[in-house]
Amino acid sequence: MKKIKKQRNKESHSHIPFRLNLLFFVVFLLFVSLIARLAYLQIIKGEEYKAEVERTESTVVRGNVPRGEIYDAKLRPLVANEAKNTIMYTRGSNTKAENMARIARDLSELIEIDHLSPFEAKKGDLSIRDLKDYFYATNTDEMKDRAKKYADKNQLSINDVSYSDIVSLIDEAELMDYSDDELKAIAIYTKMNAAYALSTVNIKNKEVSEEEIAAISEYADTLPGITTGTDWNRIYPQNDTLRSVLGSVSTEEQGIPESEEKEYLAKGYSRNDRIGRSLIEYEYETVLRGSKSISRTETDNAGDILTQSEVYSGAKGNNLVLTIDMDFQNRVDKIVTDVLSKRRGLNNGVYAVAINPKNGNVLAMSGKSLVDGQIQDDSLGTISKSFEVGSSMKAATVLAGYMDGAISLGNNTIVDQPLRISGSRSISSVFNRSGRQSVNDITALQKSSNVYMAMIAMRMGGYWNYQQNQSLPIDGQATANKMRGYYQQFGLGSTTGIDLPNEATGQVSPVDNAGQALFYSFGQFDTYTPMQLAQYISTVANGGIRYAPRLVSEIRETNPDTGEVGSLAYEVEPKVMNYIDLPSEEFERVQRGLYQVLNGNYGFAPSVFAGTPYTAAGKTGTAQASYWGDQVERRNESVTNITFAGYAPYDDPEIAVAVVIPYLPNGRTGTDHVGMTRQIMDAYFEVGDYANEEPTSAELEEEQ
């Protein structure tokens, strides 16, 4: 019996309890490991992970500063800044759209901002896209579901669905019920959404009230990224004077040009920075831009801004001092305006340039044009528009003759007689339509001999023995090109080097026959700008130094105490483009010829300049031209341009003047070009009608 019982006991022992024990033991070990791991995470690593969750980053954000200003030669402002309060937003490095929408809603309760719905008018403050962007920001979960369905429907990966695809899924009907308060929040969100990561944009910079500034300061802790400060606008104290030359600055919305984005970003610009877009503002961008302010911005691990403090307030850009005295510029503007107001025929503009021949300083550059019957500033036209100038450039032809060897001091007399050339129009001089008269370089300029200039061109082409009614055995194109090479040394047909971008160089026309090269010699073919004409006569006046016309003479800092123009930072030196390689005796003969034009006994010009306390020299010009103005249907009509290029005083030139009055009726040109020059010189020397002129408001301010 005992044996049987023992056997049963052995059978009752099974391997199952052992497996259970093993399982329990394994489970126990797992729990111990889990507890140990939790203890490790909480006790040993707890503070580290807590710090990671609460981690913040300190990042540098650069902000805009006011641009430098532009002053005239007497330090009177031409382009200034008008300070104004502004409300700004700096976007975090990874700020979510829904967070910006919340901030926009909170801010909308504190400030007023234009927020007209696109459904209320044709041109509201907001666009349909603005409303869709806000709808997306406030309905992100819904929009993600729509995006997924769109992707499935079009068999796309969700990553292939663009933001534009997503917002296109928003129906306009869903946007029409926004309340007035919501529209205000949308207007704010739209401006915030325009900011790039860690860049600053203006939310409101017009009519920001002190109450709004105070409210934002009070609720600053609940408005991350929102700050208040000072912004600026460009203003023009001299109104339209030189407005077309001073240039413009981009708006914050325009920012830097997309075509040059890489270049500007590499220079430290942000995409929404305001930059010089044209002319002086563009040419001197690096001087005017200033040094950006630096703020230390603290963001949380989501990229949202927690705090922002200024490290460096930045420095306003340096200021430009122009060579132009506004008193003289205003007088020239009035002279030009008075002439244009008497317009005849297709004449729609008048242009005048005054330069100091000793250094290239632009003393005045005035252009006025008619636009829709109104006279407007067109100073830019002095470098951007070109015209046939006629005989006013003949001094360059005579000097080119000396440079080429076509004439010399011992051989400069030519018989003036009508030239009849086979296959070309005849050429004659006004003072001698039918006879034969011997003229030298001086009398050729005084009496404006077309024949003298044409004979110089013939000789340049290699033909010295002119015979009536014969064809010219010269290469017309090669001869014209040779003359162009000489003229360019005076600035005619080449860039003048003026410190403005994109100046025109004039129209160069192909020469179809040898006779055309002769007409080219007295200003009847290529076109030149008024600035080129002024540079040419300056080069003649000073004896052969071609200075680049210069608008900016100094770069000055800003006085930190007053905010006004400060100490000299840099003086812009005159720039020499080239020297004319001719003996002074040859220059002196040409200068004597120009002297005779205004002081001799031939023509009407001496009577216009009679009685001046200064002695002037110069040359008139009359060009048979074709109209090429704004009235397209009348282009190619025959017109006459009248011009003048002169300087004074004759023995020590201080001012060189070029005047162009284009598109006058043929045969009815008048003498305004010479009269204008006399007035401009009188205004410069403050004689004649300008001797006892009442001081301008600017002059009175200066005296006080």
Image (cartoon, rainbow, N blue to C red):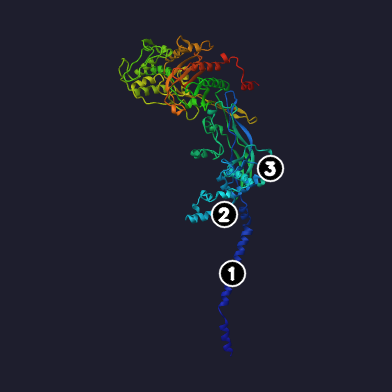
Question: x and y percent of residue 19 in the render?
Answer: 56, 75
Residue occupying the point 55% across, 54% down? 144
Question: Can the viewer see residue 637 in this picture?
Answer: yes
Amino acid type for the residue under numbered disc 3: Ala
- Location of residue 29 by image quarter: bottom right
Q: Judge depth for marks 1 and 2 and give the one in front.
A: 2
Question: x and y percent of residue 366 in the render?
Answer: 52, 23
Q: Residues within 10 Å of mark 1 (few under 14, many from 20)?
A: few
Secondary structure beneath dot 3 equals: helix
Question: x and y percent of residue 317 in the render?
Answer: 58, 32
Question: x and y percent of residue 575 in the render?
Answer: 49, 24
**Mark closest to the chain's N terminus, 1 or 3:** 1
Measured in 3D between alpha carbons, the distance from the residue under mark 1 to the one under mark 2, in whole angstroms, is: 44 Å
Q: Are marks 3 and 2 in contact (CB under 8 Å)?
A: no
Q: Residue furthest top?
A: 601
Secondary structure beneath dot 2 equals: helix
Measured in 3D between alpha carbons, the distance from the residue under mark 3 to the one under mark 2, in whole angstroms, is: 34 Å
Residue indicated by mark 1: 27
Q: Which mark is residue 215?
A: 3
Work out which quarter of the rendered image holds the C terminus and state it.
top right
Judging depth in this view, the residue of 474 and 52 nearest the camera is 474
Amino acid type for the residue under numbered disc 2: Glu
Q: Residue furthest bottom?
A: 1
Amino acid type for the residue under numbered disc 1: Val
**Tally of numbered tags:** 3
Residue indicated by mark 2: 142
Measured in 3D between alpha carbons, the distance from the residue under mark 1 to the one under mark 3, in whole angstroms, is: 61 Å
Does 385 sit left or right of 103 as displayed? left
Image position of 551 with respect to 249: above or below:
above
